Image: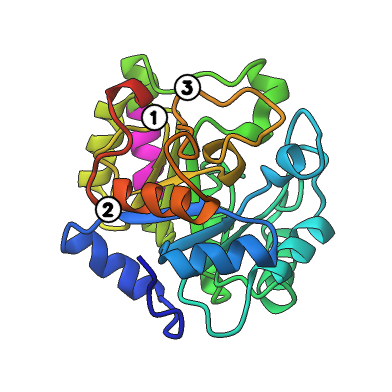
Amino acid sequence: MTQDTTSPLSINELQAMKHRGEKISCLTAYDASFSALINKVGIDVILVGDSLGMVIQGHSTTLPVSISDMIYHARCVSQPNQRAFVIADLPFMSYCTPIIAAENAAKLIQQGGAQMIKLEGARVETVRFLVEQGIPVCGHLGLLPQLINQLGCYHVQGKTPEDADRILSEAQQLQDAGATLLVLECVPAPLAKAISSQLNIPVIGIGAGVHCDGQVLVLYDMLNISITKRPRFSKNFMQDATSIEAAISAYHQAVKQALFPSIKHSF
Ligand code: KIV
């Protein structure tokens, strides 16, 4: 279905979608052509993720991605008159103090055209500082890919009661610090459900079950063109599609109708 691409979504509209129970669709993108296609289909949010380090640059982790890389790709994605809300990631070590975070977030917004920045972990004081400077923030909890060298592997988080309680409490702290969106990656579906119902802000899941307020996938995974193995929580939407546009549209519809993720794509 082709949507009106001329009225940009705001964070208020994403918030309203949560409150009326409308699922939020989100995909990553890194360039202008995919951004245009995603907008044409009517996806609500584009995430310029640091996953570009893996799917665009060919690295085995997101760690080599620089702030200049992120600005470049955010600028490619952010176009005039588009409908989708654009979030850009602060990459590894670009938010190690609140001041450094603010300087880099400002670049993503002023030079990259992003409407919001995302950072990983319970960086509560950094989030509070960014919000005080007028920078909209999306938190990211659960599996934190920028911690891969501490974690050892990409595995599901929040499986023990202690870990689940910690993630729930961190989510609340991020909201209290002023974050207005939260990405939850690779956590058990019941935990994601509890967090989504406890928080007032929209919670976007990836590998976090169907009860989140919205879903995000890495574009290249759902198109089955990633050079790495597709994660279990993702789905090949190209399998039954006749075109890339049709695959993105099938994903959008599946998210809106809460048909994706199914049990087999959840933990
Ligand atoms: O970098 C990214 O694409 C992300 C998603 C996996 C949520 O952070």
For disc 3, does the CB lie below 8 Å from ligand 1? Answer: no
Q: Examine the rendered structure and indicate whether residue 6 appears above or below residue 223.
A: below
Residue toward you, 110 or 265:
265
For disc 1, does the CB lie below 8 Å from ligand 1? Answer: no
Residue marked by disc 3 = 232
Residue type, label 1: Arg
Membership of 166 in magenta stretch: yes
Q: Secondary structure at mark 1?
A: helix
Q: Which residues are magenta?
A: 165-173
Name the quadrant of the N terminus: bottom left
Name the quadrant of the C terminus: top left
Q: Secondary structure at mark 3?
A: loop
Tell me the tag on residue 166: 1
The residue furthest left is 20
Residue type, label 3: Arg
CA distance separating discs 2 and 1: 30 Å
Q: Mark 2 against mark 1, which lies toward the viewer?
A: 2
CA distance separating discs 2 and 3: 21 Å
User: Residue at the location (43% across, 58% down)?
Assistant: 177
Residue 170 location (% of width, % of height)? 41, 40
- Alpha-carbon neighbours of circle 1 within 10 Å: few (<14), some, or many (≥20)? some
Q: Examine the rendered structure and indicate whether residue 232 appears above or below residue 57.
A: above
Q: Please identify the dominant SS of the magenta region.
A: helix
N-terminal label among 3 and 1:
1
Residue marked by disc 2 = 256
N-terminal label among 2 and 1:
1
Question: Is 218 placed left or right of 9 in the picture?
Answer: right
Residue 33 placement: quadrant: bottom right
